[in-house]
Amino acid sequence: MTLNEVLSLHSPPAVKEYTLNHDDFKKLFWKYKGLLLDLQRNNVFWSATNENLKTAYEKLDIQEQELERAYNLNKKYLDNITEGLLLIDKNLIILDQYSKYMSRLFLTDKIKGCNILDFLYPDKKVFQKERKELGKYIAILFSKTLASPEIIQEINPMVDKTIFIKRNNKTIEKVVNAKFIRIYNKEVIEHIMIIFEDKTREIHMKKQLEKEKSKYKAEIESILAILRSGPDAFFDFINESSSIFENIKQHINELEDIKLRNEFFRQIHSLKGTAKYFELNHIAQLAHALEDIFSEWDKEDTIKIKSIKEKILKMVDHIWNEFRTIDKTNTRLLKFYERAALHGSCSRDGKLDNFIVSLKRMTENLSKEQGKEIQLSIKKEIDKLPCLNKLKNPIIQILRNAIYHGIEDSFERLSLSKKQKGNIILHLFKTDNDYVIEISDDGRGINFDTIQKKAMDKHLIRNCDKIISKEELIQILFSPNFSSTDMVSQLSGRGYGLDIVKSSMCELHGKVSVATRERKGTKFILKIPETGKVKKRVK
Amino acid sequence: MKAVFINPFLNASINLFKTFLDVKLTNKNPYINKDAQNLHEISAIIGLAGDTKGAVVLSFERETAIKMVSRFSKKNYFALTREVIDGVGELVNILAGNAKKDLLDFKLTISLPGVITGSKYKINWPKDVPVITIPFESELGDFTVNVSLKDKD
């Protein structure tokens, strides 16, 4: 192919010639002008869109920065807050974000994705109740939207709650407080926020403070008691109590024997009475608690017996520790007394007088406690009483009985046309052969029908048809079985405790007799031979 | 007739006057009322049955009752109207309710208080037990709490 041929192939078609008149030209002009305007408009639109996009990108950028800042702030907050903060969903599952303190509080990093119940109470069997309670509470939070926040807070089960965290074979006890906050999305509760607060230290400190306070109170109580009654009386009390505790410890494996058990019960009861007399309320309370442990005894349940024995030993040690503190205080005060006596400013004589003063105070305190009005009158014809320390207990027991059971309350007395104020007389005198202690009250007297009924209930009397004499009923009143079985059910002094009187009098070779008239009163007469030898107590 | 059954009514009286009427009550010594049918013009009777049996009667003079109810309802009454008598009933009802709280340890049925007025009414006191009267004094006037209870053996 020649060049010309090639050129002819690509040559443009021959130009068609148009002749435009004026109108055509005008039309064409306006058409082009319209196109040009459109083009211009499009151009403006595109440049505006471009501008918008730019602003949108900028905005997105700012938002992203803000989000990042918020996230960082949130993280800082969650990392540094000293409260355990987390969110849970309706399935009780802990969400991803929680405060770092959670790991410190619960000593674990395995938090997210856990069920809150498993997290707090992993042991399903032991903490069945707690799990159920918390589960129910969270369900209420999700469902009962109308319940007021006050009610919701009132039923919160996680207030000062002790939880046990097991880590590396160790169990750590923590006291936590949890606040539950509903997180709404529009009007639906989406999550619950839980804020845990560690109260372990605070509660521990509080307990410690309480302990210190009661220790301090007990010490003051001991000092006052010793100052009132003199150190000598206390040495006897401490020695006697020590022998009781030693005996219990020694014979702990023989407690199945009901006689021995009753004997110990009686001794503790007597110890309680003496403590109350000395106004050593903390000791009286502990002795009462020990009595309670004794009365839990159930011969059928061997596992329970084992735990009771352990409890007894623990309580005995606890009381004995208290006694040791008293002993130390007593020794210190004794030195002070001796020094003071040397200077002639203080005397350790007058034990009987001290005892009588303390009996008056005891009567005042106990009658106030019972809401009764009682006057204790003393007729003292002797200056000394032999074996006073051994006589104190029986006198205290009889006086306590008169206050608790003998003297009626003021309305009862009024309705019986008696003086509103009850009267107890303690008469101390001497006959040719005996020292005599008479304690008489103008109370309701012994109701023999009641004793007989009680004795029958306790199966102490077998033949119901037999007519039982008053003397026999009095004997029953003094029997350990009558007192100890009655004791458990009685709140005030746990019953009559007259077997304590009887055994003390036996020890002193003395006699005890009772005179009583219904509605008129009761008189207990204790006689101790002047020359009688006192049997040594077996320690 | 034991204090455990009587004291709740005395304490409830003191509390009622203090809480609802802002009045301090002082009680005088109780005594055996030998003329127990001769009470004040308005008496509210609370019956008791169970561990103890009998009645607690709060007896008010006309003036005391009017002043009490006026203070209670924050209205001024000058005569012993039906409203005043109802007001006394309401006050004693509150009192019995409060006393009941302290008697929960006993087996006791406490009746709804009934109010009677006049000078010729007779109260059916239990037999063989005296009536103890506890007089109370207050700025609204005096009144008495009269008790006669026969305890179950």
Image: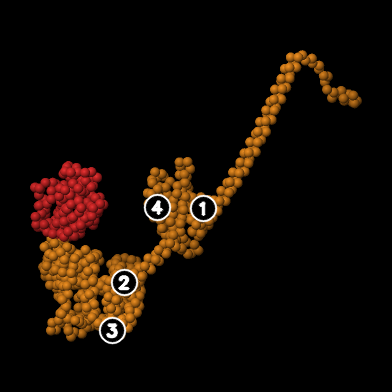
Chain colours: A orange, B red
Callout 1 touching callout 2 (CB < 8 Å): no
| Residue marked by disc 3 | A344
Label placed on residue A98: 1
| Disc on the earlier residue, 3 or 1 | 1
> Residue at the spot x=44%, y=59% of the render?
A199
Percent x, y of residue A145: 41, 44
Instruction: Give the amino acid type for the residue marked by disc 4 in the picture.
Output: Asn
Q: Nearer the viewer, residue A150 or A501?
A: A150
Give how far apart the Cα atoms at labels 4 and 2 are. Answer: 40 Å
| Disc on the earlier residue, 4 or 3 | 4
Give how far apart the Cα atoms at labels 3 and 2 are. Answer: 26 Å
| Residue marked by disc 4 | A156
Question: Of circles 3 and 1, which is in front?
Answer: 3
| Disc on the earlier residue, 1 or 2 | 1
> Residue at the spot x=34%, y=69% of the render?
A217
Percent x, y of residue B55: 15, 53
Callout 4 touching callout 3 (CB < 8 Å): no
